[in-house]
Image (spheres, grey):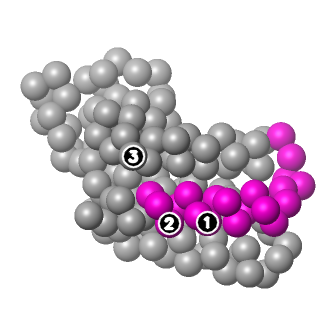
Amino acid sequence: MANKRAHGERNQKLSEELLVGGFYFDWSITTGFYSAIHFVEDKIFPLEVKSIHCANINEARRVLGVKGRHQTREDLVALSIPKVHYAYKWLDDQSRNARYKTYKVNKGLAEKAKQYLTIIHQECSK
């Protein structure tokens, strides 16, 4: 099994390089969100859900009966790491916007994504 924290840090580095590159701000945000996924999963799992041991997001999704992994993860972040819930949800929303609505994302949004990712990384590293 891959080391989630290391994977998150690798994605974070790419996100920062894309930001500095000054062109692919949409992908800077998207890779930042993918990094956040790894950080929060590393922090949350394993955990008990309804008295059932869950080692990963798929097991938690099945136990909770939630439609998808993204919703499951968002719910677990809200419960387990409430300090970063807003930042996580913001990154998720902005990543979806960049992937599915428009790739024309400005530098300011990418910089804000970096700030939120830093908050998530710090909190998940505790």
Q: Position of residue 20 (x, y in %)?
A: 74, 81
Q: Main secondary structure of the magenta part?
A: helix
Is any atom of residue 69 visible in this view? no
Q: Position of residue 63 (x, y in %)?
A: 26, 23
Tags 2 and 1 touching, CB below 8 Å: yes
Q: Is residue 99 left or right of residue 44?
A: right
Image quadrant in which you'd find residue 23: bottom right
Task: Name the residue at 73% across, 74% down.
Answer: 19
Where 86 falls versus 105 (above or below)? above
Where 82 falls versus 15 (above or below)? above
Question: Which circle marks residue 106 in the picture?
Answer: none
The residue that label 3 is drawn on is 83
Q: Which residues are magenta?
A: 101-120
The residue that label 2 is drawn on is 118
Question: Which circle marks residue 114 in the picture?
Answer: 1
Where 112 falls versus 62 (above or below)? below
Image quadrant in which you'd find residue 31: bottom right
Precedes in sequence: disc 2 or disc 3:
3
Tags 1 and 3 touching, CB below 8 Å: no
Measure how far apart labels 2 and 1 are at the Cα level. Answer: 6 Å
Q: Is residue 28 left or right of residue 83?
A: right
